[in-house]
Amino acid sequence: MPQVTSRRSEVDFAWKRSQLCGVTHDSLPENLTDTNLLPAKTALLRAAGATLSAVGDELAGLDLSLLVADRSGLLVQTVGGAQSRIGAQVEQRGLIAGADLSEEKLGFNGIGTALETGRGITVDGDEHFVAAFREFSCFGIPIIHPGSKRLEGALNVTAPTEATSSLLEGFGRTMVHQIEQQLLQNTYRDEYSLMSEFLQASRGTDQAVCAISEETVMSNQKAEGLLEHIDYGALRRAIGEARRARSSQTSIEVSSDRLVAVDIQYIRSGGEILTLHPLWQKKTRIPRGRPRANVTGDVWGDRLKTVQGRSGSVAVVGEPGSGRTSAACEASRPLEHTLIDCVDLQTAGAQVWSKRLQKAVGTTARALIIDNVDLLPAAQLSFLRQLVSDDDSTARIVITADSHSAEADERLRSVLSVADHHVEVPPLRKRVAEFPILVEALAHKIAGKKRFIFSASAVQGLARAHWPGNLVQLRKVLMQVLSGRASGQITLSDLPEAYRGDQDQPLLGLDRAERAAIVEAMAAAEGNKNQAARALGMSRTTLYRRLRSLKINC
């Protein structure tokens, strides 16, 4: 009985999700009217086509149909007996290439729910939310790339309602396993093919040439400088639009007044060879190198703009290793700075250290950074308070402190409070959105002229960690990863084992940021999940799933 009850609850909950999405029992599949919008020969289509063609003839005489959808729920391939009863029924109900089978559009169904839940699901007859599908029994299962662990799509085995669900499941899992293995084999072959095409296109040319696929980017030296200033997401979208328009040219914006024209050579095995042409007349070159980083490789963005170049004292607080000393150096710009570290007080003694500080105050007309002031005893803190609050000081005083100590020590808070400007350096675990650029900047600082590209899965693997040591810890991990490598792409498998993680484990950093965003959106919408979902740019179904998985009670 418990198993039956659990199954009933699962179906009931899926029906509630369907109702919340606005699906009705008489809904029918929405089909793309423009066939040009159908996906091109994607990795999923090639792997599924190679696998399912082998069983196509065997299915011809059976009341069985296989449906393959991409990760968005768009039906891209059907295999089965078109002359059989099930084949005719499938087609009559609009289950043809281009149909949207997402749970958001058709409620509880094999493909949509498998994509939504990330696991295999059996849907028997009347369990389908849409009445038109209730003559079918289905087993849907997601298709996961074995290498990248990325969701590629889903397979659905469809049969008349009298079919045995265990047989459908066994057959479905066997087919998906074969498709996944074919995906892996194709990836190795495709990457080799793309590299060969890239070498042929870039050899002997003075043009900017690069190769791009879902997991790989290669470029010659001239293209490297341009790619550093191009948003990869925007570039991929532009290529996708050009492919659908059957065009071999597109353009991408680099800045408000600069465009790069792109000639596209589509590679049959997947990916594209791009030739980049800057479309500006001035001779001024785009600055080379990564976004400006400080000595730790950290990128500050707009955090320090309000204090740079302004007069008055500055207090910088943050956790150990978060980059607060580097932030203090950046905050001092454009002035040159002198640094006094309070750690030295332990070895030099309070009297010697205090004289050293007083001398620095009296002789420098630049910026004076006093680092780790949370280590100072009461007497030195009193002197420091006077120094920070002195508007007539010839030097710009910048102090740094451990944020944990600042919370616990009232005297330290008193010193920090009299500073004219305050900067809080967030810990690494709260900078999830900045992880791609942080990793890139640190890697560039470590590797110098060597060129490394971190895959999305590798960046996500790093972002999962808690990082108690913040940027210092991240730098050590990257040094370990890059040690002994000449160049190339860094994938999830290249990371130390502790940072690879199980894909099913919570994404600590990402989940924390996502949870905060969802809670804020729910509060702004006063608990209205439809409004919150729109504000977050996700479907209501996805919002409900994230509310459950992140344990958010509303």
Image: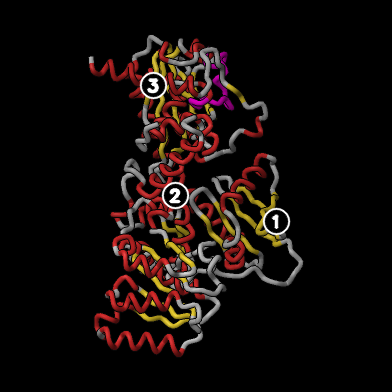
Which callout, 2 or 3, points to the residue nearer the camera?
A: 3
Task: Classify the position of the N terminus by image quarter.
Answer: top left
- Specify the segment rendered in magenta: 89-104
Determine the CA span between mark 2 and mark 3: 41 Å
| Percent of width and height locating residue 110 | 43, 23
Query: Would you call the spot at circle 1 few (<14 residues within 10 Å), some (14-19), or many (20 or more)?
Result: some
Query: How many other residues sit within 10 Å of disc 2, few (<14), some (14-19) or many (≥20)?
Result: few
Q: Which of marks 1 and 3 is nearer the N terminus?
A: 3
Residue beneath the point at 52% across and 19% down: 23
Q: Which residue is under mark 2? A: 188
Nearer-the-camera pick, 324 or 115 = 324
In this rendering, the answer to whether 151 lies above or below 466 is above
Pick the front one: 149 or 320: 320
Query: Which kind of residue does numbered mark 2 sit on?
Result: Tyr
Q: Considering only vertical position in the picture, is 389 above or below 489?
A: below
Q: Is mark 2 on a helix, strand or loop?
A: helix
Q: Is mark 3 on a helix, strand or loop?
A: helix
Q: Distance between the residues labelled 2 and 1?
A: 30 Å
**Mark before the other along the chain sequence, 2 or 3:** 3
Q: What residue type is labelled 1?
A: Ala
Which of these two is toward me, 24 or 399?
399
- Identify the disc placed on residue 261: 1
- The label on residue 13 is 3
